[in-house]
Amino acid sequence: MVAAKRPRVESVDLVRGLVMVLMALDHVRDFVGMPANPVDLATTTVPLFFTRWVTHFCAPTFFLLTGTGAYLRGRRKPKGELARFLVTRGLWLIFIELVPLRCLGFQFNVDYRLTFCFILWALGWAMIVLGGLIYLPDWAITTFGVVLIAGHNLLDRINSQNPLWVLLHQPGFLLNTPRHQLVVAYPLIPGSA
C-alpha cells in the first residue's frame, strides 16, 4: 500500500519558480549583455537597471522560503528529524558552493588559492542555524526573527575584519594568507550596503 502524498503548497512553488526565473535573467545578463555596471546611473539604461534592481529581492526571498519550508515540514515531522534534514541540507549547500560550483562553475581550478563564498554558502549556514533554532519555543523564534530583521541595520556602523564578524555581517576575508584567501561575499546577516 502506497501512502498518500501531501499536496505541495503551490503558492510557495510559484514564488520559488518566479525567483529562479529572475535570477536566471540576471545571470544571463552577466554573460551575454554589454559589460556595464547596471547600477551606475550615469552609464546604465532603464531595462538594464531594472533587471539588476529586481534581482535584489531574490536572495532574501530564497531565505524566506527556506524558513517557510522548514515551518511547513516541521508541522508534519518531529523536531529531531527536521533538525537533521536542515543541518544535512545546509552542509550539502556549503559543499556544492565550495566544490563543484567553485571548481567547475566560477573559477575552473582546484587550487583553492582564492575562494569566494556566495549565496549557497550563506543559505547553507542559515539552514544549519535554523536546525538549532527549531528547538526553541515559537515565541523565542519569533522574537529572534523580529530582532534580526528590525535591528540588523544597526550593525552596519560596526566595521571589523574579525572573521566571526565577516561571517555574520560584513563581507570580507574569512582567511587571508599568502597561499589561501577565503572571501565571504554574502554574510549570514547582510548589511544594507
Image (spheres, rainbow, N blue to C red):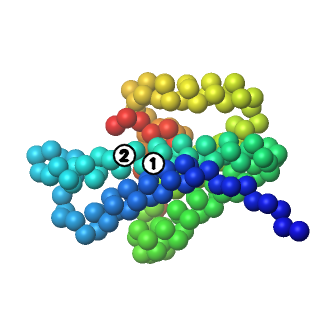
Q: In this rendering, is residue 140 above or below 15?
A: above
Residue 55 x/y as whole percent: 36, 50
Quadrant holding the N terminus: bottom right
Q: Describe residue 161's horizontal placement relative to residue 79 as left or right.
A: left
Instruction: Say the numbered circle drawn on residue 59.
Output: 1
**Helix, strand or loop at mark 1:** helix
Q: Crowdedness of circle 1 by 10 Å Cα count: few (<14), some, many (20+)?
A: some
Residue at the image point whose x is 48% and y is 45% from the top: 61
Q: What kind of residue is marked 2?
A: His
Give the image location of residue 51, x and y in percent: 28, 53
**Residue 160 place in picture, x, y as percent:** 43, 35
CA separation in Å, label 2 and label 1: 7 Å
Q: Going 29% across and 51% down the picture, which residue do you hit?
A: 52
Check the image and name the residue furthest to the left. Answer: 42
With respect to residue 137, does 86 lie above or below? below
| Tally of numbered discs | 2
**Is residue 154 toward the left or the right of residue 120 in the image?**
left
Instruction: Report the front residue among 9 and 58.
Output: 9
Q: Which mark is residue 56?
A: 2
| Contact between labelled residues 1 and 2, with CB atoms less than 8 Å apart | yes
Does residue 122 show up? no
Q: Is residue 87 left or right of residue 20?
A: right
Provide residue 18's location: percent of width, then percent of height: 44, 54
Quadrant the C terminus occupies: top left
